[in-house]
Amino acid sequence: MAVPQAPLAPTLTGDLAAYGRCSRPARAAADVVARLAAAGAELAGRIAALNTEPCVLEPWARARYRDGLAGADVAVAGMAGEAAPVPLTRGGSVVMTLVAVDEPANLAMNAPVGTIFSVLPVTDAVGGGLLQPGRRQLAAGIILFGPATVLALTFGQGTDVYVLGPDGFVSTRRGLVLPPEPALYAINAANARHWHRGIRSYVADLVSGSSGPRQRDFSMRWLASLAAETYGILTRGGIYLYPAESRVQHGYGRMRLVYEANPVAQLCEQAGGAASDGHTPILDLVPAALHQRTPLVFGSRAKVERVHRYLAGAPARHEDSPLFAHRGLFRS
């Protein structure tokens, strides 16, 4: 069992203080994380009180995070819910992205919500460098608000977990490694009719369980919150899929590459997993727009690679032939 370390917030202590002795962008990234953690602790209290409507909480949280970054070495922030990047400090050495409250509708049924963030070095590009490949991220993390408030964080040297206590976030798990082969998957099955053939085949083989080609039974979960699903994958393993769909409006996927997919992919890779759009690693994609969407598949590396094979390979026989389909001529 890991021994709790020094508090992460509200000040730079312990491991973050050591990290802060590095380059200016590295120090800035550490400071940003500490500030977000402090603001997240306040947000946790507001969520726990359950007296704020979801439609009010999200803009409040965005404003609270923005206030917490006042005076930080951050040139600009890209925030979900804002049409344009938010300027912060002229001459800042880093830029950052933020989803203040992921899936606020979950609060209506007392289900988890979360914050998703990343920090990148500033560049001369338009927007200060928000449209960089995810591999350039200096820090990435999620804050999950559930029965406990949990921070999963990476500075590119492994993924660590912190839990909010009376004095701030304390370290509980260092160098997290995804369990390799649990029989778990997360997907929104309500969209099955819109999936492309490879994803339909992959999920059909999971659903067929021990009587199908995988010869084992699988369990499905769906929490709607990407932050909550990410923490579940990090701690229990498995795979998460939000694939592209046949519908025109979702043909390029639903997850936001800059705000959501990149930080989640960084956390997952640093825990020994993988993340892709079904073909290309998420962290290798070069965003062309701040609100660009992407398919997202992440989790245990072997599972992500298996999805790649399904998407690249020929369709299974039952996908093409009515005679041999699961509900074909001879099956009701």
Image (cartoon, helix red, strand yellow):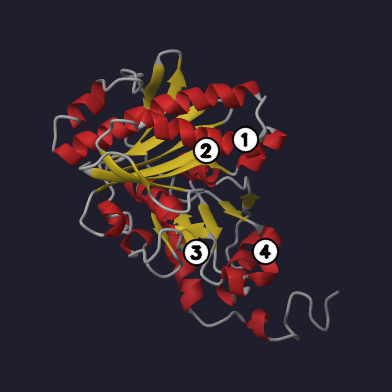
Q: Earlier in the sequence, mark 1 or mark 3?
A: 1
Q: Earlier in the sequence, mark 4 or mark 1?
A: 1
Tell me whether circle 2 and circle 1 mark residues in contact (CB < 8 Å).
Answer: no
Crowd tier of the residue under label 1, counting other residues whose Cα lies within 10 Å: few below 14, some 14–19, many 20 or above = few
- According to the picture, the residue beneath numbered tag 1 turns out to be 56
Point out residue 332 in the picture as x, y percentages from the top left corner. Answer: 86, 74
Q: Residue at x 49, y 45 (%)?
A: 230
Tell me whether circle 1 and circle 3 mark residues in contact (CB < 8 Å).
Answer: no
Q: Secondary structure at mark 2?
A: strand
The image shows residue 20, relative to residue 313, as above or below, that is above
Q: Secondary structure at mark 4?
A: helix
- According to the picture, the residue beneath numbered tag 4 turns out to be 191
Point out residue 202 in the picture as x, y percentages from the top left corner. Answer: 58, 68
Point out residue 99 in the picture as x, y percentages from the top left corner. Answer: 47, 44
Position of 311 with respect to 125 (left or right) is right
- According to the picture, the residue beneath numbered tag 2 turns out to be 114
Distance Cα–Cα, label 2 vs label 4: 23 Å
Residue type at mark 1 is Val
